[in-house]
Amino acid sequence: MSQTNMIMRTRIITSLILAFFTLVSLNAQVIQQFHESYEINEVTDIKVDIEGEVEYVKWKGRALMVESYIRLENGSSAIMRHFLKKGRYNIISDESETRLVVESEFKNRQAIVTPNGTCDEIVQIKVFYPDIFKHDGSGNFHRVLTEDEMGYDED
């Protein structure tokens, strides 16, 4: 085999390897995580209406905490930054004296379409709710008052 053929073969193999890694990097995942907490001082009822896959977890804390995990497949960090800036994943709250409502600002998100195709968007939410609340199985919670909270003496 001549030296010219060896050089050509090496260039072809190098080009194939670079093309492979370029394709792999184009199909990269972009991940963003964040959390928000909400005080529940006098709140007796909580309603959670958040888009995405939601898991409810009871905990000993005295605040409602929402943890968001967003993953874009076949997307870029620029796309993620754009949608974060536009508020696509924002969670808003409305609190009265005894009621807290926590919900997605944007419901029914449209698919993310780029010149390279559709980005798969995985939004997973964990809602940590205080153990002094009873969960009804959907997004509604009601405070379970104890004798101490009601102001009863043990006498």
Image (cartoon, rainbow, N blue to C red):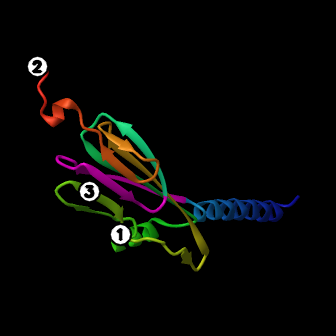
Q: Main secondary structure of the magenta part?
A: strand
37 falls in the magenta region: yes
| 54 relative to 110, above or below | above
Q: Nearer the viewer, residue 146 or 55?
A: 146
The answer to which of 135 and 93 lies nearer the viewer is: 135
In the drawing, what numbered circle is on residue 154?
Answer: none
Name the residue type under label 1: Glu
Chain part drawn in magenta:
29-52
Residue at which label 2 appears:
155
With respect to residue 124, does 63 lie above or below?
above
Front disc: 3 or 2:
2
Residue 35: give x, y in percent of width and height. Answer: 33, 51
In the image, taking residue 71 as reference, residue 7 lies left or right, namely: right
**What residue do we see at 63% from left, 60% from top?**
24
Disc 2 crowd, CA 10 A, few/some/many (<14, 14-19, 20+)? few
**Residue beneath label 3, please?**
100
| Cβ atoms at labels 1 and 2 below 8 Å apart | no
Looking at this rendering, what residue extends furthest in the bottom direction? 115
Crowd around label 1: few <14 · some 14–19 · many ≥20 (10 Å): some
Q: Position of residue 78 (x, y in %)?
A: 43, 70
Q: Sort mark 3 into few (<14), some (14-19) or many (20+) by Cα contacts within 10 Å.
A: many
Of the pair 89 and 48, the residue shown nearer to us = 48
Of mark 1 and mark 2, the one earlier in the sequence is 1
